[in-house]
């Protein structure tokens, strides 16, 4: 049905679903709609260490029905579009969801089933969804509500990423051509 399935293989999906949810892994059921709290997890992953979200799986990683084959392509498009919508995720971060066909031995059904896998990197910026900032810990997404929590996140990001650091003594001749 889908002529272009992306790079994740069925074997890789099997390996992922053998794990339990953790700071960098989240399973969400999504038979015919995106979960209402999906962007809280995306925001938390962007704000922490990144991670993988498997849509169409139970919290324990088992896949019974996956994502409805009639909806999988549209849900994947919706997810990409919403990640590029500043009213949903700010600053925007265009995600590339992958549709993976589920092997028969991974599901209870003989019909072809699909999962949507979203690999979310760690971001150099602090992201929010619908005006709320989330961070990730253990296997959950937590809203940062106090100014102290938000400052700690900005401080952590500022020590890891150097995009906004000014190096006043750095000159053009310090860079090598062709790199």
Image (tube, rainbow, N blue to C red):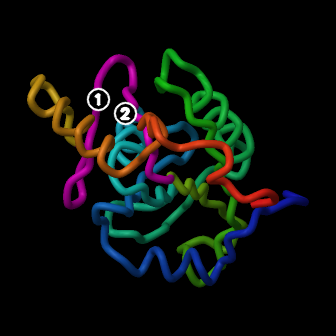
Residue 103: x and y in percent read 66, 78
126 or 1: nearer the eye?
Answer: 126
Q: Residues within 10 Å of mark 2 (few under 14, many from 20)?
A: many
| Residue span colored magenta | 121-141
Q: Quadrant of residue 109?
A: bottom right
Confirm whether the magenta stretch covers residue 107: no
Q: Is residue 37 visible?
A: yes
Instruction: Please give the residue where the numbered disc 1 appears in the rendered image.
Output: 133
Mark sitting earlier along the chain (2/1):
2
Residue 78: x and y in percent read 65, 32
Q: What residue is shown at x 54% (from left), y 80% (from top)? A: 14
Is the residue 92 above or below the residue 66 in the image? above
Q: Nearer the viewer, mark 2 or mark 1?
A: 2
Instruction: Please give the residue where the numbered disc 2 appears in the rendered image.
Output: 126
Secondary structure beneath disc 2? loop
Quadrant where the C terminus sits is bottom right
Residue 68: x and y in percent read 64, 50
Confirm whether the magenta stretch covers residue 138: yes
């Amino acid at each position: 049905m889908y002529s272009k399935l992306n790079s994740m293989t069925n074997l890789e999906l099997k390996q992922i679903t053998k794990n339990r949810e953790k700071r960098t892994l989240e399973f969400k059921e999504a038979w015919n709609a995106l979960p209402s709290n999906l962007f809280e997890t995306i925001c938390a992953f962007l704000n922490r260490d990144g991670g993988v979200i498997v849509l169409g799986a139970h919290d324990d990683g088992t896949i019974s029905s996956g994502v409805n084959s009639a909806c999988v392509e549209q849900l994947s498009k919706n997810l990409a579009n919403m990640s590029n919508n500043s009213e949903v995720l700010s600053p925007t971060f265009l995600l590339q969801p992958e549709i993976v066909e589920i092997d028969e031995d991974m599901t209870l059904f003989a019909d072809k089933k699909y999962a949507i896998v979203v690999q979310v990197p760690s971001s150099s910026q602090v992201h929010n969804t619908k005006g709320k900032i989330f961070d990730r810990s253990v296997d959950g997404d937590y809203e940062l509500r106090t100014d102290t929590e938000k400052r700690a996140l900005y401080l952590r990001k500022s020590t890891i990423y150097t995009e906004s650091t000014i190096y006043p003594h750095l000159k053009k001749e310090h860079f090598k051509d062709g790199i």
